[in-house]
Amino acid sequence: MKHAISTLALAFVFAASLFAAPPANPLPQLKIDDAAVGDGKSPALASYADAVEPAKKSVVSIASARFVRQRLPFPWFAPGANREYKVEGLGSGVIVSADGYILTNNHVVEDADELTVILSDDREFKARVIGTDPKTDVAVIKIDAKNLPLATLADSDKLRVGDIVFAIGNPLGIGQTVTMGIVSATGRRVGILAEVEGYEDFIQTDASINQGNSGGALIDAKGRLVGINSAIISPTRGNVGIGFAIPANLARNIMNNLVTSGKVTRGYFGASGEPLTPDLAEALDLPRDTRGVILNDVTPDGPADNAGLRRYDVITAINNRPVTNAADLRTHVAQLPPDTEVTVRIFRDGKAETAIVRLGKSGDALAYNELLPGVQVTRLTASQRRSLRISSSVDGLYVVKVDGDSPYKDWFAEGAVILEINRARASSVETARNSLVRGRNLFVVYSKGAVRTMVLVVK
């Protein structure tokens, strides 16, 4: 049976154009406890009520409403007549500051015209959206209140598989509910955010999560917030023990961006690669069990290039966080702001080295990888070739994106591969740019299983 991937607000969740103007507020005052949950010992406990009770008070229900106007059928009976109806949804959220900042999911508040927050003591407040980030499914909303019970945030990087966790939320609208499980995995990527080219780094848990739990708390055995519940995988749309939460550290970083500027600005590394295979490791004089990412495209004058990184370098860690695939590299960098200096551990010519890279802005990638106005390209990787079933004989620049207003939108399709420009191999973005001339250019392009040659006028 094909498994469905479900986001978790009640089946009819939607929600809003309620976005507040980017606030100039200081960061929320958070309670943070970054110690590990245990000291390596696992004492038996008869109850976790003392840990759960304070955390429950910080978890809220979020009722959302969207007003839909629909033109009535048979307009000749009542020209111009419309009917309006309200679509309602329910999710959860976590209070993280005493003055009313609340973390939840983007899909809980998306497209909502009204948001109502119900506290654990049944008080109700109207809420406004401070900001959302669809690429991580994080949203921040705020209510006007003081002295609210707030969650204590843990360092989610210190979670270990096997740690006990509790999911708190309002599943199926029945009222606040606590379920128990363990951390099943960390760093999970399952494609839930693929449509928005998102950043997945989920905590997987078997604590029962159902529709309505979205945006609720995942807490550890000390009652500290380690994640924001976000999604499940299920063949039935109900809980089968495979739930996912956004790590608290990631949610906190996104929140800080949204509160201070109303948007999220991510770091940019300026290099891409693919997982190191045993055969590649051996060819590079490394042990076959070495794990990392081998760089196959370093953007000229980008952050990685300026730090001295080059093709065939093998990245094994960034700021001591292991890098085993391209998604690790992308996610780790995206969680850091521009101008951050990161320590990159690499192997070069079989020897271990360290490089310091100052990250650029994520938007810089468009300028670095724009071959023609509105045409973004990157070097074709082996993983792209496999996923698209492209022959190993095809090598060049993969067309990642073509803007709708690009003057070249009728010439290039996303997924095409530029093989040659003016009889020179398109082996890198820099080489391709240098091959272009003003006026008529001869392109050889692979697209939809066929190779074609075309003449393109570049102004």
Image: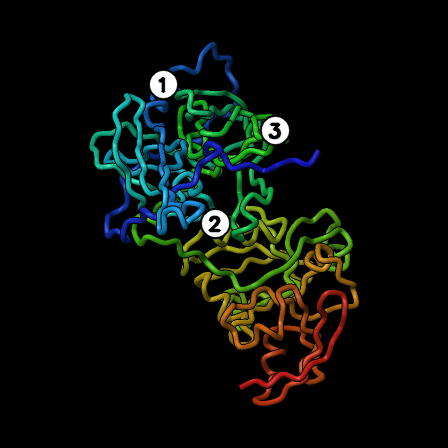
| Label 1: element kind | helix
Give x and y (percent) for residue 448.
Answer: 72, 65
Looking at the image, is mark 2 or mark 3 earlier in the sequence?
2
Mark in the foreground, 1 or 2: 2
Q: In the visual, does 256 lie left or right of 134?
A: left
Q: Nearer the viewer, residue 351 or 129?
A: 129
Res. 414 visible in picture: yes
Q: Mark 2 points at which residue?
A: 135
Residue at (76, 51) in percent of width and height: 278
Looking at the image, is mark 3 or mark 1 earlier in the sequence?
1
Give the vertical position of 427 relative to 342 (above or below): below
Looking at the image, is mark 1 or mark 2 earlier in the sequence?
1
Give x and y (percent) for residue 255.
Answer: 36, 45
Q: Which residue lies furthest to the top in this view?
A: 46
Mark 3: which amino acid? Thr
Mark 1: which amino acid? Glu
Residue 246 image label? none
Give x and y (percent) for residue 114.
Answer: 31, 39
Mark 2: few/some/many CA within 10 Å (<14, 14-19, 20+): some
Q: Nearer the viewer, residue 296 or 254?
A: 254
Give the vertical position of 248 relative to 406 (above or below): above
Mark 2: which amino acid? Lys
Residue 53 image label? 1
Residue 261 placement: quadrant: bottom left
| Label 3: element kind | loop
Residue at (59, 76) in percent of width and height: 430
Give x and y (percent) for residue 244.
Answer: 53, 34
Q: Name the residue under label 3.
A: 236
Residue 413 placement: quadrant: bottom right
